[in-house]
Image (cartoon, grey):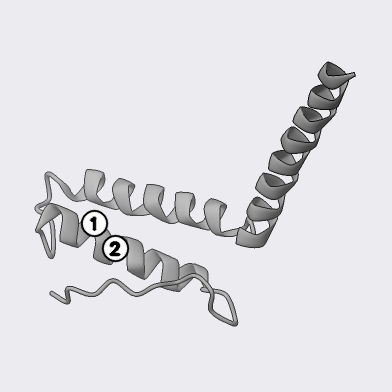
Amino acid sequence: MCRNIKTLHHFEPPATEEEVRASALQYVRKLTGMNSPSQVNQKAFNAAVEDITALTLSYSTRSRFTVRRGRVRSRSSRRLSGAESAKSRCV
């Protein structure tokens, strides 16, 4: 099994659902140490792949820049409100 897991963010065009599912399958295989699970474990194995695929797709819909912009705005508003309170204490 390959040791490198393909990075799917910051690509143009964005990763497709099939690529995300293939990466999730690779991740679950690596994590469990099983290339193909037994019949007893097949249901749990497939559920893990689908869960990771769904989580990855829901996370990747949010732009990294949108998240960062929100953090910067909240940080600057806290800083500005702290500056305003400091001015009022000096007066």
Question: How far apart in space, not on screen, are marks 2 and 1 (Cα)?
Answer: 5 Å
Left or right: 28 as drawn, with respect to 7: left
Label ID, residue 28 = 1
**Residue extending furthest toward the right:** 91
Within the image, what quadrant is residue 35 found in?
bottom left
Where does the image place residue 65, in percent across and percent down from the top left? 66, 61
Where does the image place residue 24, in percent across and percent down from the top left? 34, 61
> Which type of secondary structure does the marked residue at label 1 adopt?
helix
Left or right: 43 as drawn, with respect to 15: left
Q: Would you place residue 66 above or below residue 1 in this image?
A: above
Q: Would you place residue 82 above or below residue 89 in this image?
A: below
Question: Which residue: 43% across, 73% down?
Answer: 19
Question: Which residue: 35% across, 69% down?
Answer: 22
The tally of labels here is: 2
Question: Which residue: 69% across, 56% down?
Answer: 66
Question: Which residue: 17% across, 73% down?
Answer: 3
Where does the image place residue 40, in percent across and percent down from the top left? 12, 44
Where does the image place residue 82, in percent across and percent down from the top left? 75, 29
The foreground one among 72 and 44 is 72
Task: Give the class, few, some or many, for how many residues have Cα within 10 Å of label 1's Cα (few <14, many ≥20).
Answer: some
**Residue extending furthest toward the front:** 90
- What's the amino acid at mark 2? Leu
Q: Which residue in the protein does label 2 denote? A: 25
Q: Would you place residue 14 above or below residue 51 in this image?
A: below
Tag 2 near tag 1, CB within 8 Å: yes
